[in-house]
Image (spheres, helix red, strand yellow):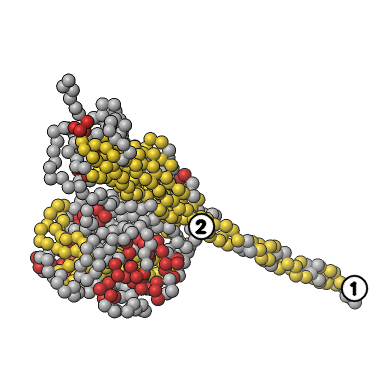
Amino acid sequence: MKKLIILFLCISLMLGMLQSITLAYEEGDPNIEGGGGGMGTGTSTDYWNGYDGVRITVVDAETGAAVSTPMDFSNGTQSGTLLHFGKVNKLQYLSGTPLTLQSGVAYQYYKPAHDMPRIVGGSRGYNIEAIRRYFCSEYAAMLVAGTAGIEYELFVSGQYKLLLEPIAYFTHNSRHFCMTATEAALYDQLAGGSLRAKMPSLSHKNLPLAMFLEYPDLGLPAYSGSTSARQSNETIITSLGMGIISYTDAPHEQLEPGEADYEYRVNTEVITSVTLNAFGEINPDSPATVTFYISGRIYTVSSIVIPADGSQLVWVKWTTPASEQIVTITVSTSRGYLIENTVTAKIVDFGRSPPPDPVATDRNDGFTAPSPPVKPQCTSSAWSVWWARWRANWQWESNWQWVSDWVFIIDERGGGNWYDYGDWYDFGSWVDNGWYEFFTDEYSASLNAASMITPDDKAPSASGKLMKSGYGINNTVTANLTTNAPGSHVAAAQTAVSYFPEFAYMTYWRLLERTSGAYMAQLEFRQNSFSTYDKRVHFLPVWYPDGAYTVYTWLLDAWTPSGMLSMNLSDHVIIRGSLFDDWYTNRG
């Protein structure tokens, strides 16, 4: 399914109208896909605290020439003094515009009154469906047209396209930057690989993979490489960090505000993360406590330490309800500040669309086997936890005091006076004027899995991978989660969903369940209600043609603090003939 993002510009006169505006989709041609993966935490000098945005340029649909100045948008409040490279888009950089630091030029941006969904993946990843629903609204299109000074009807007529580029705001070498993916790659080239060395998960994975093209457009190429691996500067500059939207004049479907930040499955052990930031040092003498309030329960994470201007993921591991619903999670902290104080989780049930029972009279004469889909996947992630150790620095602190020594001295006349023959003495002491040194424990997790499709043992003529249509198949998924983290940091793979070619890998699917293990788990089809023997099978249609019958399985719900791990899996059997070939009559 194509991913659709259309960015809007927000102007202040609309602030009082947001609650009464109806948001509806604009029909468009979305040329945007996205990827990304786990996001580790940084250091006190190099870190990303979660702020992102989008640079948008309105261009002529035929020539690609810009008809508006590129404009930046961010949900967060950004400093006018952060370092930036002006308003230059990817097409301009590819045409030879050099990367030029705007020294002393205040950074200009727009902060939408109606918050955008997360654009760049990270600790919580991003929800492409929420992005599509939000940025495809008629409201957004009207704001873009109005701010660009283009008549709305003309704007959506197909004469213009939108060039979108994800932005990240981050700290590098203790300096605050704003960069698009293209700018980050160009900067890394000029800086001798400094960005890739210090914060590669942001600059060379999540930021560039936030948007890329499904097919060539405006002279920019499509991208079909890895959606979860770190990328080279050259690949980012030429092929990543951009999306294109073409409008057509047909508004439809309403956008509901408050899209979910997470989507979880029912009865699933999950991890919800937030990012805690520190203005000043949070040390063991006064550590931070973060509290999560979920469905009437309170989860507390204590003893959190973070260096000044640093950040860290803070998470809770919990089990979702047994029924579909929306869960609103509120989060508070005793120290530092949180980017999100409210997290919305949508709980869904994948077990509601099992395939119908195939019968002998079913037909599909024009069937052509489709290609299996490829869903978003992330097979590894990394994160870290700050800890602090006291660095002793013993110093003598003087405390000079006069100690009197009074002596009475008789003079020549028989009288006398008291005289103080005392001296200064140092009553000081050794004092530890040390400080806390901060370190990180680095953690990671990786998911390795395989699907094995085999004929069911009730298929009488099956041999190895060879079988006849009309009989059942089994699916055994093995999922191994490898991690160096404590159990409170991760949840092993719990969900697998299989999709089948006779339904074009849509409409119906079969949910697997974990039958053994945890970190080394085995998942199989749930018992089929149409099976005479209550077996864990999927029945193939009798009409399925000879050749490969490929089952696609999406393995998911292996959770870490930096996001969910998932994998695309597939395996097949070979069809030769149908169960009718096993029928015979005895007329002797």
Residue occupied by mark 2: 440
Please give left or right for residue 249 compared with residue 511 in the image: left
What amino acid type is highlighted by mark number 1? Gly
Q: Label 1: how many residues lie within 10 Å, few (<14), some (14-19) or many (20+)?
A: few
Q: Which x, y percent locates residue 162?
A: 20, 67
Q: Going 90% across and 73% down the picture, which residue do you hit?
A: 414
Question: Which is nearer the N-term, disc 2 or disc 1?
Answer: 1
Camera-nearest residue between 412 and 584: 584
Residue 158 is marked as: none
Q: Which x, y percent locates residue 580?
A: 19, 32
Callouts 2 and 1 close, C-beta under 8 Å: no
- Looking at the rendered structure, the secondary structure element under dot 1 is loop
Q: Going 44% across and 70% down the picture, which residue do you hit?
A: 194
Decide if residue 333 is in sight here: no
Residue occupied by mark 1: 414
Q: Going 22% across and 66% down the picture, which residue do you hit?
A: 216
